[in-house]
Image (cartoon, helix red, strand yellow):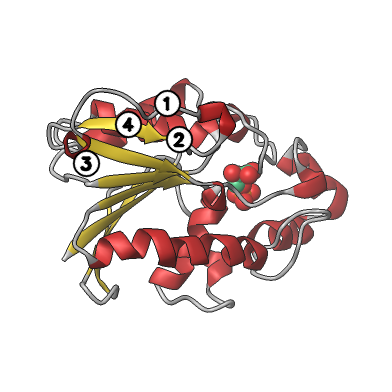
Amino acid sequence: MAQLILIRHGQSTWNAANRFTGWVDVPLDRVGRREAIAAASKLGEYVVDVAFTSLLVRAIETTAICLTESEGLCGGKSPVFKHDADDPQWHGWDKYEGHRDEEIPIFLAQALDERYYGDLQGYNKAKMAEKVGEEQVHRWRRSFATRPPGGESLEDTARRTLPFFRDRILTHLREGDNVLVSAHGNSLRSIVMELDDLDTEQVPGLELKTGVPLVYEIDNTGKVAGKTVLN
Ligand SMILES: O=C(O)[C@H](O)COP(=O)(O)O
């Protein structure tokens, strides 16, 4: 049995300001950093073998805080962000002294980025609700198939998150590796929808809190055998 730890990043500056964020790359605020530290301490009894994060800084910060503030999460190993050495920007970065089996590799994946909120990005959610109505804003935020103007629906988001989840993350879990995934409200909702076997009627009720880890037990066929929410 392997453990899959999913964590939505801690509160960002734009979560605090109640603004649609999507791909806007804002950092954690002080509350968010504290949430990530609290998550790290709740994860003290777990050990991971590999981690995945989106490319957005709020998820990267949360990953780094969890792996460095938790007593045991790295099992004494050193966490290293694994940039793509084929990318000219990173050419040669991976030539360094040291044993790779003493590391926790952290893979950065665009597939895990937040749902693209299109033309809504930057707008205050409450002010938008005054303008177009609560129901419309709720549909944009929580329905499965409705696209926000110029943006991605949850269904669109799932089309990139789920193939990545099945190919890259589940493969580790089937082999018995424990995995940490740090991502976003909606990119994680699309993955939780699959893990919890939720249908399109149930998914609008699915809310993930910032900085609260979900721990899944996954068997060697890739099936979910248990779930704990570390509130
Ligand atoms: O992109 C955002 O604004 C948040 O990360 C998630 O927002 P939501 O809860 O409105 O979908």
Q: CA distance from mark 3 to mark 4?
A: 19 Å
Q: Determine which of the numbered discs, if any, sits on residue 217 in the image.
A: none
Q: Determine which of the numbered discs, if any, sits on residue 83 in the image.
A: 2
Contact, mark 1 vs mark 3 (Cβ under 8 Å):
no
Which secondary structure, mark 1?
loop
The reply, left or right, for residue 192 in relation to residue 19 is left
For ligand 1, tell me if the residue under mark 1 lies within 8 Å: no
The amino acid marked with disc number 1 is Trp
Task: Depth check: give the residue in front, 72 or 139.
Answer: 72
Q: Nearer the viewer, mark 3 or mark 2?
A: 2
Percent across and percent down for residue 190 are 52, 63
Contact, mark 1 vs mark 2 (Cβ under 8 Å):
yes
Q: Residue furthest right?
A: 131
Q: CA distance from mark 4 to mark 1?
A: 12 Å
User: According to the image, label 3 marks what residue?
Assistant: 43
The amino acid marked with disc number 2 is His
User: According to the image, label 4 marks what residue?
Assistant: 80
Q: Earlier in the sequence, mark 1 or mark 3?
A: 3
Q: Can you tell which quarter of the image residue 100 is in?
A: top left
Which secondary structure, mark 3?
loop
The reply, left or right, for residue 21 in relation to residue 182 is right
Identity of the residue drawn at 45% across and 33% down: 60
User: According to the image, label 1 marks what residue?
Assistant: 93
